[in-house]
Image (cartoon, rainbow, N blue to C red):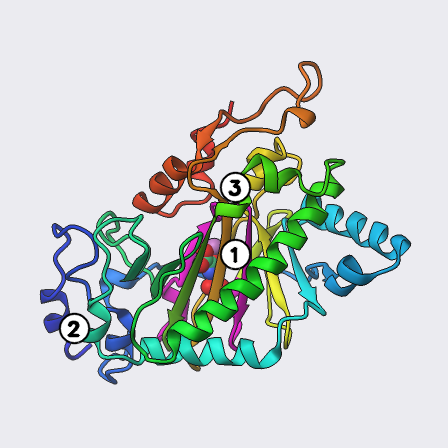
Amino acid sequence: MVGLKNFSLSLSLSEPMAATVAGIKHLAESGILTSVPSNYAFPLANSNPVSGSEIPTIDFSLLKNGTPDQRSQIIRDLGNACREWGIFVVINHGVAKCLMERILDACHDFFDLTEEEKREYVGKHVLDPIRYGTSFNPAVEKVFYWRDFIKIFVHPVFHSPDKPASFRKVASEYSTSIRNLARELLRGIAESMGLEGCYIDKALGLDSSLQIMAMNFYPYCPQPEVAMGLPAHSDHGLLTVLMQNDIGGLQVEHKGKWVLANPLPNSFLVNIGDHMEILSNGKYKSVVHRAVVNNKSARISIAMAHGPSLDALVAPAPELVDGKNHPPAYRAMKYKEYLEMQQSNQLNGKSILDTIRL
Ligand code: OGA
Ligand code: NI
């Protein structure tokens, strides 16, 4: 535990936001750690049972270019995946493999900047369009998660850090590709609920939808069994499209057990967020998931969150509500208010969604 004293001195829990908390990458890669510092220790981090069930797979090419029969079948499959899992693997998605490699490289290059360079991007407010930080919200956490992140608003206005030099171009290309994929999936999901394909686009103002690129860096950890990458939580927004390097770590909750979401080469994991649960009046539920860490090598994931327009008031779709069998299950709330609340509290299961359940 050499060097920990010095590190603790640089932490001050009374400071606002993450400004004084150094990224964990810096400490983990310094070579001085033989165990997890006490302010990162979650004694039962990995204690839950793991199930062998498999996350469903959706062949995107059939949604986009299939025959009418193939398309109807894949929309039924999408509906089942959303209802039973809240997460699915997307294959044949049409996003170029080299673009996926380039964005992973850009992500590596960003986290390889010096701590000083990265600090330029420390946000002051959770809605700042570029925000570098560590853990989830160190201002309100007593124990920190083993993760550094940068969150960038890439739509409706595209933002990007200026460093590294190549970041902006690839981030822009990647954001557009993934947004197109998400919008097509949202059309299929709307149809799977018996709504018109363009229902979500219109109801939630998707031409000015908020898209956030969250890049996560989980460094090598000397004691992965007592540290947490990200605790169990659901995502805000409608759909998150996640890719990762070849190191696994994501687990999703399914029927009371944790299921490993191992990275399939050249695929995306797509999960339902809280706003899809609200819009669908609980027909499709946001999936609870968490990220564990490992003692082999650093894990990178890029989570693209696709939400409504920031100004959209999100409520259960009237078409899915009836007074008798399906009363409204959530109170309406502006997406911006929800996002602000979710990002400025502790990350804790579905606690934010619970505040608007009726
Ligand atoms: C997230 C998230 C999971 C992962 O960023 O919200 O859940 O595997 N990430 O990094
Ligand atoms: Ni998440």
- The answer to whether one can see residue 254 in this image is yes
Density class for disc 2 (Cα within 10 Å; few <14, some 14-19, many ≥20) is some
At horizontal 64% and vertical 40% (from top left) the residue drawn is 284
Q: Amino acid at mark 3?
A: Asp
> Which-is-in-front pick, marks 2 and 1?
2
Q: Amino acid at mark 2?
A: Leu
The residue that label 2 is drawn on is 4
> Residue 18: which numbered mark, if any?
none
Q: Amino acid at mark 1?
A: Asn
Q: Is residue 106 left or right of residue 126?
A: right
The residue that label 1 is drawn on is 48
At horizontal 10% and vertical 72% (from top left) the residue drawn is 6
Q: How far from the left and from the top, in percent, is residue 61?
A: 76, 65
- Does residue 234 lie above or below 94 as drawn? above
Q: How far from the left and from the top, in percent, is residue 5?
A: 11, 71
Tell which circle, 2 or 3, labels the residue nearer the N-terminal end.
2
* Secondary structure of the residue carrying numbered label 1: loop
- Residue 238 vs residue 29, the one in the foreground: 238
The residue that label 3 is drawn on is 274
- Does residue 256 lie above or below 70 as drawn? above
**Residue range corresponding to the magenta coloring:** 221-250
